[in-house]
Amino acid sequence: MNEEQEEQNNNTYKKGRGAQFNPKNRFLKNERVKEQIESIDDWTEPNIATQYLEDKSKTLVNKVDSPDVGMWYSMNPYQGCEHGCIYCYARNAHEYWSYSAGLDFERKIIVKKNAPELLRKFLMHPKWECVPIALSGNTDCYQPAEKKFRITRQLLEVCNEFNQPVGMITKNAGMLRDKDLLKEMAKKKLISILVSITSFEEDLRSVMEPRTTTAKQRLRLIKELSEEGVRMGVMLGPMIPGLNEHEMQRIMKAASENGATFSAYTFIRLNGAIKLIFHDWLYKNFPDRADKVWHLIEHAHNGKVNDSRFGVRMRGEGPIAELVRQQFKKYNKIYGLNAERWELDCTRFRRPGEQGRLF
């Protein structure tokens, strides 16, 4: 293979990955760059296969201070996510671990094996006053790593033991492995689940969310768990003008028909390194409409592709964002998706050994 052929091979689109490169980590002063494609350095990564990196975390449950995300506390058994969703806001958090928000986020998965132990310690603290905890608030707790490590299952077992209510969000039908446990928690009103569906168009999903299950399988997830009495909802997020916002009615109708009783949505925003990653992905996959989509996103964020103001950042502003909001409101009513999301019972919470609560 000559240099020209090798360079072409290196520039080949990486199927099965969302990001196609690693943007610079804003927190790192120094950067290692391979200046020649034929060079070999001691830090050169041998392949792009997913790596699982064990971390001995000191804490697990985090207080959520953002007023517009709909949760009070969250816990994440994994950092980084192999699903590879190109728009994922959690990508930026990977920079805090000294990795890139790009390919690193998808192939360097940090595994918190001691998460169940940390959760038990947290719930045993006498100052904990029970409110629902989100699992996860950042990366998907049922990403492919869960099949191997089963940390999410262990966290749910701890919550079930303490009667600690949990709100979950996923786009992976692997959640059905825990149907028995979720059914048991549902009987005590300890579980509420959002299933994220962004598109029924497989050509779009396969590049936008390359290692996720299909929309058909996500509907199956809603149907099977709702039939077991689990409270199921649908998350339409993010809605991207020119790519998937026209599917809103179809998604909400299908979710309702399969047992969903509540819903939520977000409008696309591209903060931090996600702006670079998404722009590269958009123009490589949809060159015929990339300019239009990019400008529509800008029009919804006051000429930018991101607005960090609480209450506005995940909804957008202007005619395009307002049209999406009105559609969501209309179809929410038509398809009966207005149920209260956090209809969970905190009164059952008990630490092991407690006989009852003193008020």
Image (spheres, grey):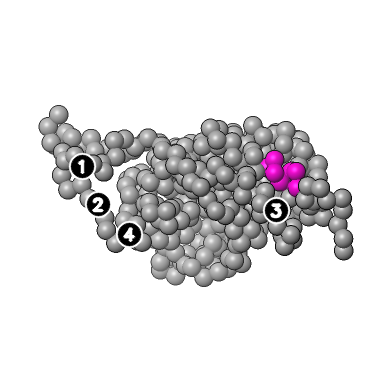
Q: Earlier in the sequence, mark 4 or mark 3?
A: 4
Image position, residue 318 (x, y; %): 51, 68
Q: Amino acid at mark 4?
A: Leu
Q: Earlier in the sequence, mark 2 or mark 1?
A: 2
Query: Does the stretch in magenta take in 247?
Result: no
Please say if 182 is above or below 337.
Answer: above
At 20% from the left and 47% from the top, the residue drawn is 34
The answer to which image quadrant residue 293 occupies is bottom left
| Measured Cα–Cα span from mark 4 to mark 1 | 20 Å
The residue wearing badge 3 is: 123
Q: Give left or right: position of 40 versus 192.
A: left
Q: Are marks 2 and 1 in contact (CB under 8 Å)?
A: yes
Q: Amino acid at mark 1?
A: Asp
The residue wearing badge 1 is: 41
| Measured Cα–Cα span from mark 2 to mark 1 | 10 Å
At 31% from the left and 56% from the top, the residue drawn is 24
Image position, residue 177 (x, y; %): 64, 32
Q: Are marks 2 and 3 in contact (CB under 8 Å)?
A: no
Q: Nearer the viewer, mark 2 or mark 3?
A: 3
| Measured Cα–Cα span from mark 2 to mark 4 | 10 Å
The residue wearing badge 4 is: 28
Q: Quadrant of the C terminus?
A: bottom right
Which residue is outermost to the front? 353
Q: Quadrant of the N terminus?
A: top left
